[in-house]
Amino acid sequence: MEPSLIKFVSALHVFWYRLTGGLIGGRAAGGNPVLLLTTSGRRTGNERTTPLLYLQDGENFVVVASYGGSDYHPAWWLNLKANPESAVQIRGERLRAKAEEAGPEEKARLWPLLTKMYPGYDDYQRRTERQIPVVILRPQG
């Protein structure tokens, strides 16, 4: 999918998710849950919101910086690397979170759970030489 089309579809997804408290857009890809992740742009400081599939792991939320198997990291991940503070919306609930990349052991535990949820992640990893990051969003306060 072209980047401009991805941006358009993503913006439409965010609009409907926010308007309906996640009733529209709260599930995707075979019924998997979707959250809205808001980061601060690393260059502009402007807020950027992206809908992402997620896996709940205890109190944490786990997302994958796959960018569809692109050779480039998604902007939201680069933003989080520059500033790990973020906002998460799940359905009607909003919370602050701090992001960190899963270490090797944690990724080894989480990856099979993520690919069980969405098998496409394995295909994405095969398409690129970069190691796709698994990102843990830890609620703050």
Image (cartoon, grey):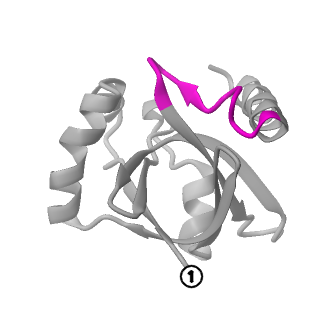
Lateral position of residue 92 relative to residue 30, left or right: right
Front-most of 46 and 52?
52
Lateral position of residue 118 relative to residue 2, left or right: left
The image quadrant that residue 117 belongs to is top left
Q: Main secondary structure of the magenta part?
A: loop
Residue at x 23% of width, y 50% of height: 110
Q: Amino acid at mark 1?
A: Gly
Q: Which residues are magenta?
A: 20-32
Residue 19 locus on image (x, y percent) = 85, 36
Front-most of 89 and 109?
89
Q: Does the stretch in magenta take in 112?
A: no
Residue at x 41% of width, y 62% of height: 60
Question: How many callouts does the rendering have?
Answer: 1
Residue 129 locus on image (x, y percent) = 31, 41
Please state, as top left, top right, bottom left or bottom right, where the C terminus lies in the image.
bottom right
Residue at x 51% of width, y 38% of height: 67
